[in-house]
């Protein structure tokens, strides 16, 4: 049966003026440590001056909650009788991602603890107060995760294979009045800016313009035909439409690969569409996923 740590009759921490921010944060389930504004280093345990540069400008900041088990003890005979119902339990030296090491209570995981285990802050009510305990990150050990990344090619079965960072592709086409109608057919967008020539000419655009989807559509063709190629869909786009495109205008779309994930067929690309004068009409980034179609 799991132990009810909150029912333990453990002694309360002693807070002082110096350590009060730590305990206040802990009570809210947060972990704050000092940071030195002079040298930029993180400091723990709490001190009036920075142990790295002797600076006095120490401020309290919340940490990421990520850490690593540097060393640990399994406690069978607690130093205080209040801990007896929980024994044996694990007390560990947690190396925080921010640098300092702190002593903390380590919650039991699926496996016995090992030095080097990835840990995550797990605020836990112990003896009637919330304390910054840690728990093992259960997914997989870092070692196993690294091995699976090395051995598993997330791009296996992708028609054009894994793209290289820096690879790019371009396509050019000329917009037509029929693009507007085709897009209206799909979406129902009958904005007068696409149909009422006189009104559109009096607008800020000064001309009939095609729908944004017609402009960005060239990027659909690029990712699905050229780079990364067949099977590619957009997962996320961040596009700015910076200049409207009219009817019967040449547009050139461009995609360039910026980041490639090895474990999954996902990459980040830079995207743009320019008009015949080379002016930027659309600019931004996208994340794309390429469904492996070979051997599917
Ligand atoms: Zn310092």
Image (tube, rainbow, N blue to C red):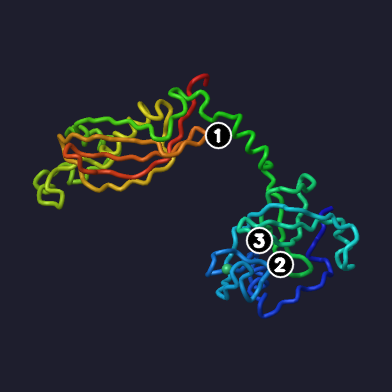
Task: Point out which mark residue 263 bears.
Answer: 1
Q: In the visual, does 227 lie left or right of 140? A: left
- State yes or no: Cβ of the residue under disc 1 lies below 8 Å from any atom of ligand 1: no
Cα–Cα span, label 2 and label 1: 38 Å
Q: Residues within 10 Å of mark 1 (few under 14, many from 20)?
A: some
Q: Residues within 10 Å of mark 2 (few under 14, many from 20)?
A: many
Disc 1 on helix, strand or loop? loop
Q: Of callouts 2 and 3, which one flags the residue occurring earlier in the amino acid sequence?
A: 3
Q: Residue at x 16, y 36 (%)?
A: 249
Q: Of callouts 3 and 1, which one flags the residue occurring earlier in the amino acid sequence?
A: 3
Pick the front one: 211 or 46? 46
Residue annotated with mark 3: 100
Instruction: Give the number of the mark in front: 2 or 1.
Output: 1
Cα–Cα span, label 2 and label 3: 21 Å
Residue 48, relative to residue 199: is it above or below? below
Percent position (x, y) of residue 181?
Answer: 21, 35
Percent position (x, y) of residue 292?
Answer: 49, 26
Residue annotated with mark 2: 130
Q: Give the residue at the far top of this rendering.
A: 295
Percent position (x, y) of residue 53?
Answer: 59, 69
Instruction: Give the number of the mark in front: 2 or 3.
Output: 3
């Amino acid at each position: 049966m799991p132990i009810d740590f909150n029912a333990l009759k453990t002694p309360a921490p002693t807070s002082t003026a110096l350590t009060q921010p730590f305990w206040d944060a802990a009570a809210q389930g947060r972990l704050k440590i000092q940071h030195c504004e002079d040298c930029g280093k993180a400091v723990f345990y709490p001190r009036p001056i920075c142990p790295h540069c002797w600076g006095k400008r120490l401020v309290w900041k919340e940490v990421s909650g990520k850490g690593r088990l540097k060393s640990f003890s399994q406690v069978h005979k607690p130093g205080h009788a209040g801990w007896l119902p929980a024994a044996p339990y694990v007390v560990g030296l947690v190396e925080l991602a921010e640098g300092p090491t702190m002593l903390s209570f380590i919650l039991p995981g699926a496996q016995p603890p090992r030095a080097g285990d990835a840990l995550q802050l797990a605020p836990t009510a112990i003896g009637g107060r919330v304390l910054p305990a840690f728990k093992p990150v259960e997914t997989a050990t870092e070692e196993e995760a690294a091995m699976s990344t090395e051995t598993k090619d997330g791009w296996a079965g992708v028609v054009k294979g894994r793209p290289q960072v820096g690879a790019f592709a371009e396509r050019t086409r000329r917009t037509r009045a029929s693009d507007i109608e085709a897009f209206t057919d799909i979406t129902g967008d009958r904005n007068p800016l696409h149909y009422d020539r006189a009104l559109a000419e009096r607008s800020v655009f000064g001309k009939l313009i095609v729908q944004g989807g017609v402009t960005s559509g060239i990027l659909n063709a690029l990712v699905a035909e050229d780079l990364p190629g067949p099977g590619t869909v957009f997962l996320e786009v961040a596009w700015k439409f910076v200049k409207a495109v009219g009817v019967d205008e040449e547009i050139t779309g461009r995609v360039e690969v910026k980041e490639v994930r090895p474990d999954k067929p996902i990459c980040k690309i830079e995207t743009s569409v320019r008009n015949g004068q080379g002016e930027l009409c659309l600019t931004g980034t996208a994340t794309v996923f390429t469904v492996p179609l070979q051997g599917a």
